[in-house]
């Protein structure tokens, strides 16, 4: 019954509306001579009063809907007493008091004072030259006159009846003042009925509110009251000190928030630093992190000794080094430094490390805790506040089928490219993410700020597949270039739901340079399409497993993919139309002129180096922006010339602009993003034509493309040099349930660090050198034997550096180029199809 509730409502609501209308007509016909029929006949004879009644009906319906919606929101945000119970309880007596005051004022002071009751009532009714509000007040006074309230006994009877009725309602709904629930609970968990009655709105809402001891909520409340464990996991590589400072400040804020909300959750912070060593020495980016950590600690705790001067714990691990810091309010910060000579690089393998270590190995004896353990995935430059995390936590706690929830990502930085991305991110979250969340579920939760359910991540078909090696060219594109989207795809395919929370704000750095931006999107574009194709291919099974993905939503995904494929052709048609509109070309000439730059750029991308491609792409972007500017002024000039906006181009432009403006109005805190919409309009050819060509042709390039650095860390590194070797063999199963398998143990020894070299001392910054000396003087502790065995087996099984032999590298590169050559003609075919469509429209 509960599962079919929505279907029943969809059938019952229209049925009740039709039935009510039929009953109304029957009453009018049957009781035509009675009071009910006379009222409607009077309305029919005085047809002119409909201009007052119809707005009243619309106003009443709108206010009822707003009251119903705000009442639900008040309960969801834990403001039930002030925003639900109190206003709904007081609204009836307050409204009646106001109406009675109006009646007595008008009858006793302004209308025929001293006459008998009939004269007064008729005088009230026959007033003319009144405004709509005065006319409504006169009607009310006339109806009140007919009750003849002057006899004291009748007035006392009505008053006492009203007071008793109100007291009965208060006593009957007294539990609504004491009901407790978690935030953002579903409407079905808050109310017995999803319908509200317009005539008795406040009474129906109050009496429909569920109690705490209702059977529907017992299991939900028990789960949601369990203390959550949050594992904050950030991945770093070549972040700048300013970017590192943002994530560290967020960790410190969360540490303070956790200390005052210990009954709600407990937290651990883990930072996985990729490529931390060069020739056994810590590189300068790790020095930046330690220096920034000391700076942030001083800013947040002026009375506390520097965190670098307190007792730190340092461990030599099979993957590199681990340093543990104690934060001011009791949380621990784990810094995991990865050595690329020992384990694999890149973000996906850092995620594999913390998934199997934190969720798999550390909670091996507390499997039930995984149901209340959540993993907050962050990038090394993410800035967020605890309130945003709490919103994501609410999403996961209220529904066990939700595997992950993401927030609203705000790009930060300076320059036109960042402005472009601000509008792009805004529209993507306002429209696309919200549409996915409502019609089905979110298709991708970004790794820069998303909260995952631990039990969902450790599903055998999720974690197991996520560790797969990239053995084919398409795997490199799908697995390594878009790890966040691939993890989301795996969760969706195994029945989990992904959600979007617009109120959970997070801020992350956006590429400011043209080359960095194009290289970032070069990774994102093909990987997004590859994962979408994978999801569509498995859609029959996914629809059966995942209740949030329906066949209609799969059709939406098909439309999304087709629109992406038609994007370049659509932009080319738009450019051809602009050329035809501005320079008065015919259709054939406009298409030829618009296609020539594409073909030339395509040839350049195949023949020239990436740096040359970027320069040509920048030049084309400027030219296309000038063309779009001319098109905009031409459209405006055409509307001025014909003195109307009802031209095809004008209507289209105004409609699109109106959609964005209305959407921005619905997001008032982000309304400023609309300012960058004009720049986004000018860059449409660059983003949907030039960038697509560049991404497809350079699909074979699997480098990261962002935060690349040409600095030699051997000269700038610290003096921490790892010595010693790893055991020759071990036989510990790290992925099974039982971790205590016997093996051949070796004697554990403390690995000494090399002394600081004088030559390096002269080159390293003095502040960094001071920090390094402090860390160097820290005593090395030993991991437990079991943990060492786990890491050794885990590294061998999943994380061993897989440098391919030269012959396999060449073959993989050839396969990638072959994949590129297979994909690129499809885009050209879509262009050809769009051109034919354009010709058809022109000649018809």
Image (spheres, rainbow, N blue to C red):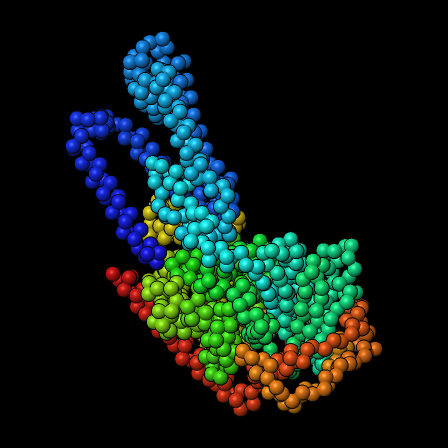
Q: Nearer the viewer, residue 587 or 646?
A: 646
In x, y percent, where is residue 168? 41, 34
Name the residue: 36% across, 68% down: 543
In x, y percent, where is residue 619? 52, 66
**Residue 272 falls in image quadrant:** bottom right
- Asked if residue 33 is positioned above or below residue 626 in the image, the reply reads above
Q: Is residue 114 visible?
A: yes
- Asked if residue 785 is positioned above or below residue 843 in the image, the reply reads below
In x, y percent, where is residue 726? 68, 86
Q: Nearer the viewer, residue 227 or 160?
A: 160
Q: Is residue 84 left or right of residue 53?
A: right
Residue found farthest to the right? 758
In x, y percent, where is residue 282? 72, 75
Q: Is residue 386 left or right of residue 172?
A: right
Q: Is residue 380 visible?
A: no
Q: Quadrant of the N terminus?
A: bottom left
Q: Nearer the viewer, residue 527 or 535?
A: 535
Residue found farthest to the top? 114
- Asked if residue 86 is positioned above or below residue 108 in the image, the reply reads below
Q: Nearer the viewer, residue 626 or 17?
A: 17
Name the residue: 47% across, 42% down: 175
**Residue 790 falls in image quadrant:** bottom right
Name the residue: 70% across, 71% down: 323
Name the residue: 37% across, 57% down: 581
């Amino acid at each position: 019954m509960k599962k079919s509730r929505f279907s029943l409502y969809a059938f019952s609501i229209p049925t009740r509306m039709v039935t009510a209308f039929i009953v109304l007509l029957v009453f009018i016909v049957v009781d035509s001579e009675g009071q009910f029929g006379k009222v409607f006949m009077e309305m029919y004879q005085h047809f002119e009063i409909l201009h007052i009644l119809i707005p009243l009906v619309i106003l009443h319906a709108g206010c009822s809907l707003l009251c119903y919606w705000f009442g639900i929101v008040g309960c969801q945000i834990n403001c039930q007493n002030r925003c639900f119970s109190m206003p709904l309880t007081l609204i009836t007596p307050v409204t009646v008091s106001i109406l009675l005051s109006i009646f007595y004022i008008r009858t006793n002071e302004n209308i025929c004072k001293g006459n008998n009751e009939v004269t007064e009532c008729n005088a009230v009714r026959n007033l003319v030259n009144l405004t709509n509000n005065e006319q409504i007040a006169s009607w009310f006074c006339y109806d009140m006159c007919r009750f003849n309230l002057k006899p004291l006994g009748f007035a006392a009877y009505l008053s006492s009846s009203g007071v008793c009725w109100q007291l009965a309602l208060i006593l009957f709904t007294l539990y609504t003042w004491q009901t407790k629930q978690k935030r953002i609970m579903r409407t079905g968990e808050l109310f017995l009925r999803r319908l509200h009655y317009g005539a008795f709105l406040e009474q129906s809402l109050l009496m429909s509110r569920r109690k705490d001891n209702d059977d529907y909520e017992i299991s939900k409340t028990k789960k949601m009251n369990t203390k959550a464990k949050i594992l904050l996991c950030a991945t770093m590589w070549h972040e700048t000190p300013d970017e590192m400072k943002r994530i560290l400040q967020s960790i410190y804020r969360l540490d303070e928030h956790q200390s005052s909300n210990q009954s709600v959750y407990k937290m651990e912070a883990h930072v996985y630093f990729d490529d931390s060593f060069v020739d056994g020495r810590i590189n300068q980016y790790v020095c930046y992190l330690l220096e920034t950590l000391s700076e942030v600690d001083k800013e947040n705790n002026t009375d506390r000794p520097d965190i670098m001067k307190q007792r730190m714990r340092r461990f030599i691990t099979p993957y590199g080094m681990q340093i543990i810091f104690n934060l001011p309010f009791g949380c621990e910060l784990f810094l995991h430094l990865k050595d690329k000579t020992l384990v694999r690089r890149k973000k996906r393998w850092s995620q594999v490390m913390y998934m199997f270590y934190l969720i798999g190995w550390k909670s091996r004896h507390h499997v039930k805790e995984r149901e209340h353990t959540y993993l907050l995935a962050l990038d090394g430059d993410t800035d967020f506040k605890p309130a945003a995390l709490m919103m994501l936590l609410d999403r996961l706690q209220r529904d066990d089928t939700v595997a992950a929830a993401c927030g609203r990502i705000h790009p930060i930085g300076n320059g036109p490219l960042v402005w472009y991305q601000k509008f792009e991110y805004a529209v993507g979250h306002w429209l696309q993410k919200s549409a996915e969340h409502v019609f089905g579920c979110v298709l991708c939760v970004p790794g820069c700020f998303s909260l995952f359910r631990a039990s969902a991540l450790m599903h055998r078909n999720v974690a197991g597949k996520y560790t797969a090696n990239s053995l084919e060219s398409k795997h490199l594109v799908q697995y390594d270039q878009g790890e966040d989207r691939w993890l989301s795809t795996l969760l969706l395919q195994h029945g989990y739901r992904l959600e979007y929370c617009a109120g959970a704000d997070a801020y992350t750095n956006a590429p400011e340079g043209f080359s960095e931006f194009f290289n970032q999107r070069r990774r994102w574009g093909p990987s997004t399409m590859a994962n979408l194709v994978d999801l569509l291919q498995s859609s029959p099974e996914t629809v059966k497993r995942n209740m949030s993905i329906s066949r209609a939503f799969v059709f939406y995904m098909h439309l999304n993919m087709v629109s992406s494929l038609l994007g370049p052709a659509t932009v080319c048609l738009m450019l051809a139309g602009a050329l035809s509109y501005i320079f008065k070309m015919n259709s054939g000439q406009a298409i030829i002129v618009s296609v020539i730059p594409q073909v030339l750029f395509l040839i350049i991308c195949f023949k020239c180096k990436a740096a040359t491609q970027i320069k040509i792409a920048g030049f084309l972007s400027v030219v296309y922006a000038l063309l779009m500017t001319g098109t905009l002024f031409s459209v405006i000039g055409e509307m001025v010339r014909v003195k109307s906006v009802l031209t095809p181009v004008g209507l289209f432009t105004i409609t699109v602009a109106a959609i964005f403006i209305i959407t921005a109005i619905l997001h008032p805190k982000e309304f400023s993003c609309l300012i960058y919409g004009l720049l986004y309009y000018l860059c449409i050819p660059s983003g949907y034509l030039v960038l697509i060509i560049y991404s497809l042709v350079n699909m074979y390039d699997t480098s990261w493309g962002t935060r690349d650095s040409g600095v030699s860390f051997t000269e700038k590194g610290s003096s921490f040099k790892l010595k010693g070797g790893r055991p020759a063999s071990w036989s510990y199963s790290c992925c099974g349930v039982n971790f205590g398998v016997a093996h051949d143990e070796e004697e554990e020894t403390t690995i000494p660090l090399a002394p600081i070299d004088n030559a390096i001392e002269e080159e390293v910054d003095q502040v960094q050198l001071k920090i390094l000396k402090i860390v160097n003087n820290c005593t090395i502790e030993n991991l437990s034997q079991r943990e060492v065995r786990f890491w050794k087996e885990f590294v061998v099984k999943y994380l061993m550096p897989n440098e391919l032999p030269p012959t396999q590298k060449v073959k993989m590169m050839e396969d990638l180029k072959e994949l590129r050559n297979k994909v690129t003609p499809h885009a050209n075919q879509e262009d050809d199809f769009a051109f034919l469509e354009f010709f058809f429209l022109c000649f018809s």
